[in-house]
Image (cartoon, helix red, strand yellow):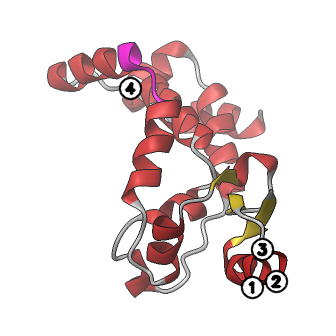
């Protein structure tokens, strides 16, 4: 069994004669995934990989939570707690840069770099708010913003 980054996979397969079972799409342990030659080819050619995005979404998202969110959206009562929940579920799918690369047509915009640390900052800001502030952002006057920024 061989685990490789996409670019070297074909060369190593040829030299070793061993099947490729997994591929790394990033530097973290969570970035190792099952190797699908057709999907890797699509990514390399810039055509995206929607099947992998769908699989990651199925693993990360809770059906019950999604149904609750759907009801809130229909009632137009989506607040920052809901946004935070969605942000955390997206983080379970991997880095935002790797997800963007899987979306068909995104290669037109060049190599888009997304700093995942910015999402950590957003999460910290939201967690520094009171429940009422998360539900009604109109409450965020200057003094409340200063309090949140200090945390």
Cα separation, mark 1 vs mark 2, equals: 6 Å
Query: Secondary structure under badge 4?
Result: loop
**Residue 63 part of the magenta segment:** yes
**Residue 122 part of the magenta segment:** no
Q: Badge 1, how many Cα within 10 Å: few under 14, some, many 20+? A: few
Q: Which residue is mark 2?
A: 15
- Residue 99: x %, y % from top left: 52, 58
- Residue 47: x %, y % from top left: 38, 76
Total number of numbered labels?
4
Cα separation, mark 3 vs mark 2, equals: 6 Å
The N terminus - image quarter: bottom right
Label 3 or label 1, whichever lies nearer to me, is: 3
Name which quarter of the figure residue 150 lies in: top right
Name which quarter of the figure residue 144 lies in: top right
Q: Which residue is mark 1?
A: 11
- Residue 91: x %, y % from top left: 60, 42
Which of the two labelled residues, at mark 4 and mark 2, occupies the earlier sequence position?
2
Nearer-the-camera pick, 139 or 101:
101
Which of the two labelled residues, at mark 4 and mark 3, occupies the earlier sequence position?
3
Q: Residue at x 66, y 33 (%)?
A: 148
Which of the two labelled residues, at mark 3 and mark 1, occupies the earlier sequence position?
1
């Amino acid at each position: 069994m061989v685990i490789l980054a996409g670019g070297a996979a074909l060369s190593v397969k040829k030299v070793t004669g061993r099947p490729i079972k997994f591929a790394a799409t990033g530097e973290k342990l969570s970035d190792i995934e099952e190797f699908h030659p057709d999907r890797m080819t699509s990514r390399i050619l810039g055509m995206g990989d929607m099947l992998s995005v769908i699989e990651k979404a199925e693993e990360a998202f809770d059906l019950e939570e999604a149904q609750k969110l759907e009801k809130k959206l229909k009632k137009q009562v989506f607040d920052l707690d809901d946004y935070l929940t969605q942000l955390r579920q997206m983080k379970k799918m991997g880095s935002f840069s790797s997800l963007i690369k899987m979306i068909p047509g995104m290669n037109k915009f060049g190599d888009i770099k997304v700093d995942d640390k910015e999402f950590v900052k957003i999460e910290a800001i939201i967690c520094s708010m009171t429940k009422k502030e998360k539900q009604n952002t109109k409450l965020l006057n200057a003094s409340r913003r200063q309090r949140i920024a200090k945390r």
